[in-house]
Image (cartoon, helix red, strand yellow):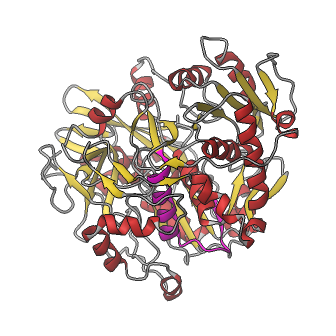
Amino acid sequence: MTADPNRTEPKVSHADLYHPSDAVKRAARIKDWEAMSRYAADHPEAFWAARAEELGWYRKWDKVLDSSNAPFYKWFVGGKCNVVHNAIDRHQSTPKRNAIAYLWQGEDGSERAIAYGELAREVGKFANVLKASGVRKGDRVTIYMGRVPELPIAMLACAKIGAVHSVVYGGFSVDALHGRIQDSSSKVVVTCDGAFVSGKVVELKQIVDDALKRENGVTRVICFKRTGREVGWVEGRDVWWHEAMKDASPECATEQLDAEDPLFILYTSGSTGKPKALLHTHGGYSVYTYTTLRYVFDLRDDDRWWCAADPGWITGHSYIVYAPLMAGVTSVIYEGGPTYPQPDRWWKIVEQYKVSVLYCAPTAIRGFMRFGPEWPRNRDLSSLRLLGSVGEPINPEAWKWFYENVGGGRCPIMDTWWQTETGGFMITPTPVLPLKPGSGTRPFFGIKAEIVNEMGEPCKPDEEGYLTILAPWPGMARTIYGDAERYRQTYWNRYPGRYFTGDSARMDADGYFWIIGRVDDVIKVSGYRLGTAEVESALVSHPAVAEAAAIGLPHELRGNTIYTYVILRAGHEPSPELAEALRQHVGKEMGPIAKPEKVEFVAKLPKTRSGKIMRRVLKARAQGLPEGDLTTLEE
């Protein structure tokens, strides 16, 4: 991917640098970023061994890293551990057992506070329920639930007994759920009667029932009662959560596992072919997620941490369930839609629970921008000290809106780049690093990232290329469940010895990384390569635009032409004059070659449930072609 010499790069001012305050620097866990970065680069195994020492082990490892069968790396070989020992068990002999693990709020306003001691009892009881259902070490359990505390309880119960959980986002279609149950050979499914989202009920149990009408090996369905709606029932197979838990003992020994024993599988989006089940293990994943959360967000005992993702995504696995519990902090979980019943729902929660760190997706931020800044400004958000961004590149306009209107101009934004495959943050600031809106800044300690061209040669500063990782890290997925060769081919064959992320990016002269987007999300117009994210960022920088999506459509003269979809902010109406103004605005921001052929105003965009725009669906619709797998669509 050699950069075209005539290409106009996005306008990013190096003067647009946000320095942390003295107070932030004084409070930071890592005060000398450069020194820590150098040490981790020069002594990676010693660095990760020292981080692992902060956690509890039944037996210490014999070897930090085994590269003998690359790319199937092994970490902390010979070590005996269990993520539940560090997330729950070790807190029970300290005052932490009385501290709040989860503050949960339902969309209907109902609330629950669950202490670490209560969490331990509930996890122990459900672990015994799973055992009574025939689940043993290594068995797969499919979890298909709404955002209720019982979802992390079910995950932790699986981990406690050495079972492998496969969480499927609540609301995925019958086809998607059935395919994942079949692929994982699950014998138990855990679900809810339904889930509340944006004033509607998602019929989870009905979807499970429809999926299980097809060939499957499921012998038990455990259903948590959330909505109280009447649901179908199969006698002998289905049991209510509350009835199964009623007589279950809270005493259940935590299984002592090898560091490389599987913890979970998690399916990636099916937008580019058959979904892949990435497999993560107990030892390395625990060390990596715990370390990244503590260093990037400087979490302290008195923090109220809110990762506003869903536990069903990798963001929720790593930074709602496992890492925050290992760190012993209080997490907030909210069940429903972000703007239900009004656009200040999130800000009310921040105010009510005194949230100190908020971590969310750029999609959510852009959605809030549509309603104007008065909604967050009318709430007391003074408890916030850090903000975070996850899921996709954040455009500078949304970054600044978030910083000014939610963070009050005082909260640094930790813009994190990572993937299901990586397990945790890979390119991210820590609070002491100066920030550039739209940049993920630098690789995390011990992560060796490099941008290369088609030939695998390092790119020059500001030259676009492929983002690769040169060395293994503890949180990496070990394989694709049931398909090791696909794992090798997908991630390691393109550039031997390097992990191929599938993302395009560039690095500026200061060593800051700018993620452009998936390699497939590049439009070639008259020989110029233009990232969809760059065009979208240019559109969103216009004061009338809340969200945008760009696609390339075939053009007989130019190769491709740019077609864009725009959601307007409140107070702006679609018009031909505004469409032309937006075309000119993109041309001014990026150069005339980037002017969209058409600007279409829409009320919503097709997105996955993790908030990523499904551009292939827009492209298919525009061309009148089949839209393919839609199981990951939000609606």
Position of residue 79 relative to residue 628, above or below, is below
Question: What residue appears at the point 55 percent right and 74 percent down from the top-left corner?
Answer: 411
Does residue 620 lie above or below 35 as drawn?
above
Q: Is residue 498 left or right of residue 93?
A: left
Q: Is residue 25 magenta?
A: no
Whole-percent x, y for residue 60 in the image: 45, 60
Q: Nearer the viewer, residue 458 or 525?
A: 458
Residue 305 sits inside the magenta stretch: yes
Is 346 positioned to the left or the right of 590 in the image?
right
Q: Quadrant of residue 18?
A: bottom left
| Residue 516 place in picture, x, y as percent | 33, 51
Relative placement, left or right, of 204 versus 59 is right
Count numbered badges in the picture: 0
Q: Residue at x 18, y 51 (%)?
A: 452
Lateral position of residue 474 relative to residue 350, left or right: left
Residue 626 seen in the figure: yes
Indicate the quadrant containing the N terminus: top left, top right, bottom left or bottom right. Answer: top left
- Give the main secondary structure of the magenta stretch: helix
Query: 548 or 334, which is in the foreground?
Result: 334
Which residue range is magenta in the image?
A: 281-306
Residue lying at 71% horizontally and 68% vertically, measured from the top left: 93
Q: Looking at the picture, tell me which residue is in the foreground, 503 or 216.
A: 216
